[in-house]
Image (spheres, helix red, strand yellow):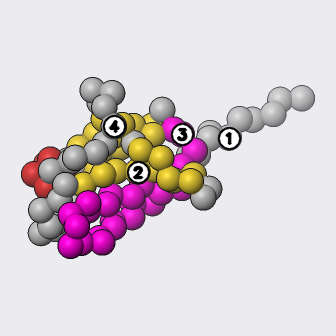
Amino acid sequence: MRRFTVALTANNNSGPFTIFWKNGYDYELAFLENGNDAVGITANQLSLGLTVYTPFEISEILVQNNKETCDNFSRIIPPTRTFPEIPIIS
């Protein structure tokens, strides 16, 4: 699993929020350090930074504002995994 700290510092929406991860075409719920799904997140939690866990191979993290009058999404593109170059000895 990969660990990310998600923070929205310029957030003026009240929420609640849900955090998803995407791999290919599917969105799945991220989960928190305590093992719970990343749902019902408050604006205060996001302003402080919230640790979420995802599988290694994801293409983006999506923070969705679930308030009925909002359809706001924040997309976060995580860095890709890099592997150290292993010299070949012959």
Q: Amino acid at mark 3?
A: Phe
Number of on-image labels: 4
Quick check: can you spot residue 9? no
Q: Residues within 10 Å of mark 1 (few under 14, many from 20)?
A: few
Q: Nearer the viewer, mark 2 or mark 3?
A: 2
Give percent across and percent down for residue 33: 29, 30
Q: Amino acid at mark 4?
A: Asp
Q: Which residues are magenta?
A: 55-80
Disc on the earlier residue, 3 or 1: 3
> In the rendered image, which quarter contains the C terminus?
top right
- Which numbered dot is residue 56? 3
User: What is the distance, in whole Å, between disc 4 and disc 1 at their CAs?
Assistant: 36 Å
- Which numbered dot is residue 37? 4
The residue sitting at 62% across, 41% down in the picture is 83
Quick check: can you spot residue 19? yes
Disc on the earlier residue, 4 or 1: 4
Element type at marker 1?
loop
User: What is the distance, in whole Å, between disc 2 and disc 3 at their CAs?
Assistant: 14 Å
Q: Residues within 10 Å of mark 2 (few under 14, many from 20)?
A: many
Residue with the mark numbered 2:
20
Q: Residues within 10 Å of mark 3 (few under 14, many from 20)?
A: few
Residue with the mark numbered 1:
85
